[in-house]
Image (spheres, coloured by chain):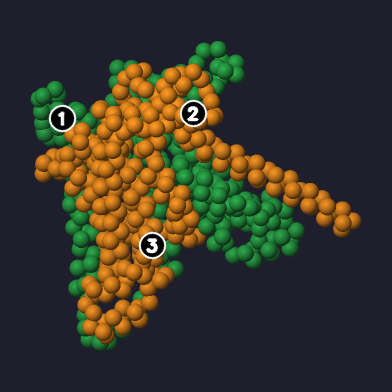
Chain colours: A green, B orange
Amino acid sequence: MGKRLNSSRGKGVSYAKWGYIFILPFFITYIIFTLTPQIMTFYNSFFENYRSGLKQIGPNFVGLKNYVALFTPDKTGTVGMLKYFGNTLILWIMGAVPQIVVALLLAVFFTSYRLNIKGQQFFKTVIYMPNLIMAAAFSMLFFTLFSTVGPVNQLLIAHGVVQESINFLGIKISVRLLISLMNFLMWFGNTTILLMAGIQGIDQNMFEAAEIDGANSLQVFFRVTLPLLAPILVYTIITAMIGGLQMFDVPQVLTNGKGTPDRASMTMVMYLNNYLGTSKNYGMAGAISVILFIVSAGLSGFVYNSLSKQYRK
Amino acid sequence: MKNAENTRGRILMIIARVVAYTILIFLAALCLFSFYMLIINATRSNAQLQAGFTLLPKNNFFVNLKNAWKDQSINIPRGMLNSFFIAICSAVLTTYFSALTAYGIHVYNFRLKKAAFLFIMAVMMIPPQVSAVGFIQLVYKFHLTNNYIPLILPSIAAPVVFFYMKQYLESVLPMEMVEAARVDGSNEFRTFNTIVLPIMKPAIAVQMIFSFVASWNNYFIPALLLDKAELKTVPIMIAQLRSADYSKFDMGKVYMFILLAILPVLVVYIILSKAIIKGVTAGSVKG
């Protein structure tokens, strides 16, 4: 970097203005479409501002009332915000834990020269595919496959596993399982590929040295691969958490936006989306956004640290 | 003794291989099964679908295709055209301006260089949903609902794509080339367009695919901004399908709708999977 500085200065021409010109479109766009809306969102969270039928209420300054409302129990005694945050967390964990375990396993398979897996390109292509599929369509597909008259129920009845079709979408645990299964399928291929790159980045001599010392595969994995992979593994988990916080398309389409049954599959962003819909309740939606922002900022602080550490190298 | 140990090792290796392949084949089958069922069911008529489960295709594919294509309430060809237009524009803007921004920060030295870079890094991971409230208000204020501008223009500022481009530039761009172009009297903007962009082609291609796919699949914001039928995108139509009265539907047609929604991305993926999978890792952290 220092060298570059000198070489351009040496000729006595300053190119600095070009730097500003080239980054200008990015920053103008960012300020208009992201930063300003972000500030407006924060601002809104302190106002009462919604539509009730055809009547527009507000905007009136109400201080922290929206935040208080978010954490006030409803008639049934549940705090919506906490419930949906909990749902998001549960759905994320149910999908992410198997996702990371399986991805680790596959990454080890693919990179092991002793196992020497054939057809890697095929397997990688297949497991990564669901990641690119439209989540709304994927979810709609699962809805049709698992509906009471869908092929899964037909199959179960035909083989006498059940007498009557199961209403998969009416049972809390099966809805949650379906959502996490979809999330798992959409993301384990991606994680596998990232972790593979991580393992390939480890100095090969480490593995050889461990083998010469007579370590078996399990020992190599737990004593060499895992500790050296830890930074990238943590990075993967944190970015997956940020992704999980945004969970929307899959449960939204699967449950038709209702988070059925009994709002057990309603996520944070679905909750936010509800306030943005016909009621246009910008105050409440703003307050939810601020909470989402705080959680994701906390998580991204970590990613930022690990990235900038890498950058200093 | 040594021999016995060798045989034991070899047997263990064979077992390990069998286990590994079994797991891989199981997961691959799990990934493919739902799509296989989708394709099979798209070839069956409503009556055939009611009759029961089958793994074999029937001959109703083109009838379903025609029904889905000509449906009055869900205009899927129009939706595909709309989605395609938005996705192409976003992909071009996102890659071009991310490359431009990355080049600006990589090559030049200016006072705010570091601050600009740190800023982009800091906001990289913030989910777009958290500014949705203000974004929608802004769109309403400027009367841009049912307009594609708010769906396309923001893609100029894509921090993640910028980061990818920056990393790519660091690994491929020799400063001598930029200097040589300067000596030849090329202005900075022309140098970027005619010399740097071609060098960045692989990175641009990969990011174009990713941003095309992301835009094609995007549901949250478009669903809040588009309510005119002729402007709706594919994901909105699919979600509409879900909220419609399900029992009245020709299921063959429903499966065909879903198939059409994912088909463009599926085809692109099958053709370019190698490059796409390579692209997944290139932009991420290295240990």
Of residues B188 and B255, the one nearer the viewer is: B255
Q: Position of residue A193 (x, y in %)?
A: 51, 52
Chain letter of mark 3 equals B
Q: Residue furthest top?
A: A163
Residue B53 vs A209, above or below: the answer is above
Q: Residue at x 56, y 38 (%)?
A: B29
Disc 2 marks which amino acid? Lys
- SS of the residue at dot 2? loop
Q: CA distance from mark 3 to mark 1?
A: 45 Å
Dots 3, 1 in contact, CB < 8 A: no
Residue A271 vs B15, above or below: the answer is above
Of residues A64 and B152, the one nearer the viewer is: B152
Residue A134 figure quarter: top left
> Tag on residue B58?
2
Q: Residue at x 28, y 72 (%)?
A: B194
> Tag on residue B144?
none
Disc 1 marks which amino acid? Tyr
Disc 3 marks which amino acid? Ala
Q: Is residue A250 visible?
A: no
- SS of the residue at dot 3? helix
Dots 2, 3 in contact, CB < 8 A: no
Q: Position of residue A268 (x, y in %)?
A: 34, 34
- On the image, numbered disc 1 is attached to which residue? A50
Of the image marks 2 and 3, the number of the one nearer the N terminus = 2
Indicate the quadrant containing the N terminus of chain B: top left, top right, bottom left or bottom right.
Answer: bottom right
Q: Is A250 placed left or right of B15 in the picture?
A: left
Of residues B24 and A264, the one nearer the viewer is: B24
Residue A306 figure quarter: bottom left
